Amino acid sequence: MPKANRFLTIEGGEGAGKTTLIRFLTTVLQERGVEVVVTREPGGSFLGEELRELILHPKPTEPLCKEAELFLFLAARSQHIETLIKPALEADKVVICDRFNDSTIAYQAAARGFDKKKVQNLCDIASLCLSPSLTLYLDVPPSIGVRRAHRRNDQNGDQIDRIEQEDLSFHEKVREGFLELAKEDPKRIRIIDTTKAPATVKRHAEELVQEWLKQIL
Ligand code: T5A
């Protein structure tokens, strides 16, 4: 496994602003002459994108049980690492990944109710023990984030996905799960308040990433 110090993950609940921020950070890094690979979970490989569709927009004929959901996320991750993340890190590129193991802990353990330690052990297996050296957790109350995600879907003509459809209490548990992870590992997981104006969010994220670049380049 390559050194993972160039591996950056962006985490958050629904509509937290991950996509928006990743676009901005990619530009910041490229302007510094850094080669960047941007990817997402579930997804990032052929199998991962197929699994994404099955997980987020399954055929209505058969509800997806939570155990199958957990293992599909993990399967997508292993394939993603083998085919895209590992080769990019080995080529000394910076990899920015939209979601990774922390999402599985927040969604499948904290919100779906699986035992956290067991899910962490499964994540270690699925991710070949690869861990990011910096994670930006974008924090927003679900009442705001879900509204933003719905508005964006309406504007883009996108369908609301299976997990976005969960009720607010589910998304509150996801948020608590992320905040607990950030408390446990404050050096790696940095919290950014995305109720703030986009310019403020970008400035905070850029400061953290510039600091990180000093350590990894
Ligand atoms: N999942 C994933 C699991 O359950 N387990 C796992 O292990 C993994 C890997 C993936 C789903 O799968 C689940 C989690 C998810 O439910 P996704 O597409 O990655 O789906 O997740 P979403 O949260 O749905 O991501 P979105 O793409 O919908 O939201 P983003 O990217 O966080 O938000 P973004 O940037 O599109 O912004 C949303 C809207 O808000 C505006 C933007 O312009 C946009 O319109 N916005 C702001 N508005 C005001 N102030 C700000 N600061 C703003 N920042 C952005």
Image: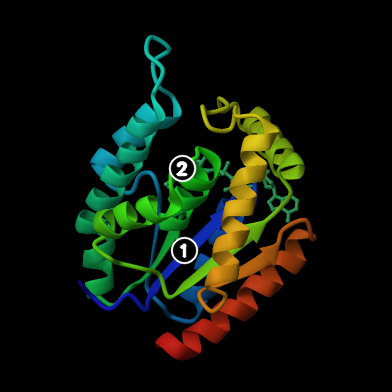
Name the residue at 30% across, 60% down. Answer: 124
Which circle marks residue 156 in the picture? none
Q: Residues under labels 1 and 2: Cα distance?
A: 18 Å
Residue located 23% across and 49% down the image: 79
Please tell me how many numbered marks the rendered image carries.
Answer: 2
User: What's under tag 2, amino acid-wise?
Assistant: Gln
Q: Secondary structure at mark 2?
A: helix
On screen, residue 135 versus residue 196, left or right, reads: left
**Nearest-to-viewer mark from 1 and 2:** 2
Q: Which residue is mark 1?
A: 9
Give coordinates of residue 186: x percent, y percent. 57, 75
Query: Front-most of 132 and 108?
Result: 108
Q: Say which of 184 and 45 sits in front.
A: 184
Which of these two is toward me, 157 or 62? 62
Quarter of the C terminus within the rendering? bottom left
Horizontal and vertical percent for residue 112? 50, 37
Q: Residues within 10 Å of mark 1 (few under 14, many from 20)?
A: many
Q: What secondary structure is marked by label 1?
A: strand
- 51 with respect to 31 (left or right): left
Three-letter amino acid code at disc 1? Answer: Thr
Disc 2 residue: CB within 8 Å of ligand 1:
yes
Residue 108: assigned label: 2
64 up-or-down from 183: above or below: above
Residue 77 lies, with reference to residue 162, above or below; the image says below
